Image: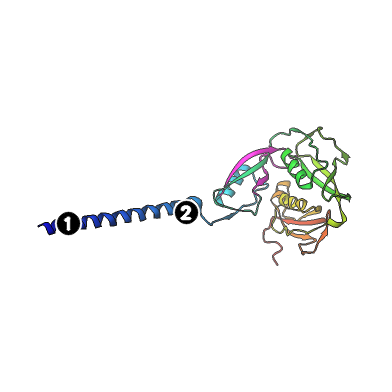
Amino acid sequence: MAQNKKSFAGNWIVRNLLLGVLFVVLIVAVASIFLSIRTRHGKEVVVPDLSGLLASDASHAASAAGLQTIVLDSVYMKRVARGAVVSQNPKAGSHVKPGRKISLTVNSMMPKKVVMPNLVHVSLRQAIAELNSKGLMLGRLDYVADIATNNVLRQKYRGSDIAAGKEIYTGSTIDLVLGLNGSDALTFVPNLRGYKYLSAINALHNSSLNVSSLVFDKSVRTYSDSLAAMVYSQRPGATGVPTVLGTGVTLYLSLDANKGDN
């Protein structure tokens, strides 16, 4: 009888130990699965190009890619559809985790005035960021000999210098005169194939290059079409050969995403 009691007690202890171990393993497994789903560990998605889309359409496009959008700012651009996306962060083509929020700047319904910032003596990269924050457009980049490459020497509006502090409508185009040191005067033409109109221009400016001309095919009939059109060819191409800063690039654009494949 005593032997049976000992046997029963031993089985009960072993059984509870096994159940305890099983419970811990189960908890760890569930937590691991939950964290994996929560963080989507190791998974990334490509940020779509939302430029030119209405905010609602941009939200749908982002959702289809597993992302979200949030409108953080607005600017006014004369020929851009009201409510259309002007810029986004992260940029199109970036690799991010699913669920990431894309910050959008959209075209406002009515124009507003902003104070022209002082871009003189800042770098081109800083100048671009400042213009974007004010809702102003970067126009032509003109280079002159100087000790510092891409140092802003002058800021111009409609062909004349514009002083910092002057009120100007958002969407206005600002041209920059920049320094060019002979020992640091080269850049590379990026491959813009598949880029939309505005994104292609931004990419050229970020590479210290100009837009020589824009050539739209017959599929592009309106300005809204031009915003949705994609680059199918460019001259010069992305050959990997260095070119001088300020070089002009001609872009050929179409609404046909397959144009230029052959």
Residue at horizontal 78 percent and vertical 45 percent from the top: 138
The reply to whether the magenta stretch includes residue 84 is yes
Q: Is residue 254 visible?
A: yes
Element carrying mark 1: helix
Q: Are marks 2 and 1 in contact (CB under 8 Å)?
A: no
How far apart in space, not on screen, are marks 2 and 1 (Cα)? 42 Å
Q: Pinpoint residue 168: horizontal percent, then vertical percent.
A: 79, 34
Which residue type does callout 2 highlight?
Ser
Residue 8: give its label.
1
Residue at image mark 2: 36
Q: Pinpoint residue 247: horizontal percent, then vertical percent.
A: 84, 56
Q: Is residue 218 above or below residue 169?
A: below
Residue at horizontal 64 percent and vertical 53 percent from the top: 94
Q: Is residue 79 visible?
A: no
The stretch of residues the image draws in magenta is 67-90
Q: Pinpoint residue 15: horizontal percent, then vertical percent.
A: 24, 56
Q: Residues within 10 Å of mark 2 (few under 14, many from 20)?
A: few
Q: Quadrant of the N terminus?
A: bottom left
**Most foreground residue, 87 or 245:** 245
Q: Pinpoint residue 125: horizontal percent, then vertical percent.
A: 76, 47
Which residue type does callout 1 highlight?
Phe
Q: In which quarter of the image is the C terminus?
A: bottom right
Give the side of residue 130 with respect to residue 15, left or right. right
The numbered mark, 2 or 1, whose residue comes first in the sequence reads: 1
Q: Residues within 10 Å of mark 1 (few under 14, many from 20)?
A: few
Residue at horizontal 71 percent and vertical 33 percent from the top: 110
